[in-house]
Image (spheres, rainbow, N blue to C red):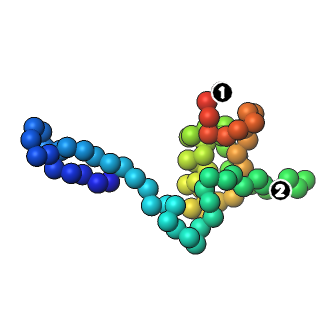
Amino acid sequence: MSVIPAETEGPWKICVIRTVADELKSHPSVDTPRRASSAPGQHFDVVILGGGQSGLTAGGRLQVLGASYVIIERQANVGVAA
């Protein structure tokens, strides 16, 4: 987060929230979802129902924790409202 002090009224002029994740070359693109292979009898530690913002956030957190998971979404695209 970048905060710039105001020259006139109020304590702050602008607040900018930005991400530097795009600059990380050692990690795959987060803009392209990876599809899981569907093997009979495949085991997942967690099943997430719904690929909206909350489901994707939960999946990202589980990935960081090293848990296997699958997100099941009924819509063709993930991350959008129905």
Query: Would you name the residue on which mark 1 appears?
Result: 82
| Residue for point 70% across, 38% down | 77
Q: Is residue 52 left or right of residue 21?
A: right
Q: Quadrant of residue 63?
A: bottom right
Q: Residues within 10 Å of mark 2 (few under 14, many from 20)?
A: few
| Residue for point 57% across, 48% down | 58
From the viewer's perspective, is residue 40 above or below residue 28?
above
Camera-nearest residue between 21 and 42: 21
Picture coordinates of residue 61, whole percent (x, y): 55, 54
| Residue for point 49% across, 65% down | 23
| Residue for point 62% across, 52% down | 31
Camera-nearest residue between 22 and 58: 22
Picture coordinates of residue 12, whole percent (x, y): 17, 44
Residue 49 showing in the rendered view? no
Q: How many marks?
A: 2
Quarter of the image with the N terminus is: bottom left
As drawn, which residue projects farthest toward the top?
Answer: 82
As drawn, which residue projects farthest toward the bottom?
Answer: 26
| Mark nearer the viewer, 2 or 1 | 1
Element class at badge 2? loop
Q: Earlier in the sequence, mark 2 or mark 1?
A: 2
As drawn, the label of residue 37 is: 2
What amino acid does circle 2 point to?
Ser
Disc 2 and disc 1: Cα gap in Å?
Answer: 25 Å
Q: Residues within 10 Å of mark 1 (few under 14, many from 20)?
A: few
Quarter of the image with the C terminus is: top right
What amino acid does circle 1 point to?
Ala
Element class at badge 1? loop
